[in-house]
Image: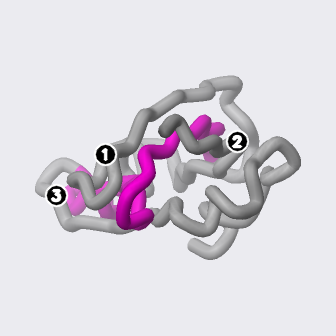
Amino acid sequence: MLCLLLCGLAHADEDAVRFVQFVQEPTATCVARNGQQIQVKNTHPTRSLRVWLDRMHMGVGTGDRSRSDLAPGGEPEPLGCSRNLNGVQEWRVARVIYIN
């Protein structure tokens, strides 16, 4: 899971990235696939973050890049299951900026 936060940070604001946190939750759909739901959240107490994430499937980039605006102290945003029907997937931080 460490790679979810630390891999691919070439374009991330090094200060802002420390407030991006990945969390896991056991949802029915994901548990049925022997996985957990991966979520991303902002742990900064007062500033919002804009986060770009790259999705990886079985260690290979899928070409999917998502962008999320995360409020300080807000609810985690669901990304998907740690496993799909074919194998493991993960998300890596590509870029993070403060938006306020």
In this figure, which colouring scheme has been used for the structure?
Answer: one colour
Q: Earlier in the sequence, mark 3 or mark 2?
A: 3
Q: What amino acid type is highlighted by mark number 2?
A: Arg
Residue 2 in percent (x, y) is at: 63, 75
From the viewer's perspective, is the residue at label 2 or at label 1 nearer? 2
Region of the chain picked out in magenta, as a range: 30-57
- Cα gap from disc 3 to disc 2, whole angstroms: 27 Å
Please give left or right for residue 39 compared with residue 25 in the image.
Answer: right
- Give the amino acid type for the residue marked by disc 3 in the picture: Thr
Q: Residue at left 61%, top 62%?
A: 4
Which residue bears the numbered disc 3?
27
- Give the residue pinned by disc 2: 95
User: Along the horizontal axis of the image, is 71 left or right of 52?
Assistant: left
Which residue has dot 1 on it?
Answer: 77
Secondary structure at badge 2 equals strand
Identified at 22% across, 53% down, the residue is 75
- The residue shown at (57%, 72%) is 1
Mark 2 Cα-neighbour bin, 10 Å: few <14, some 14–19, many ≥20: many
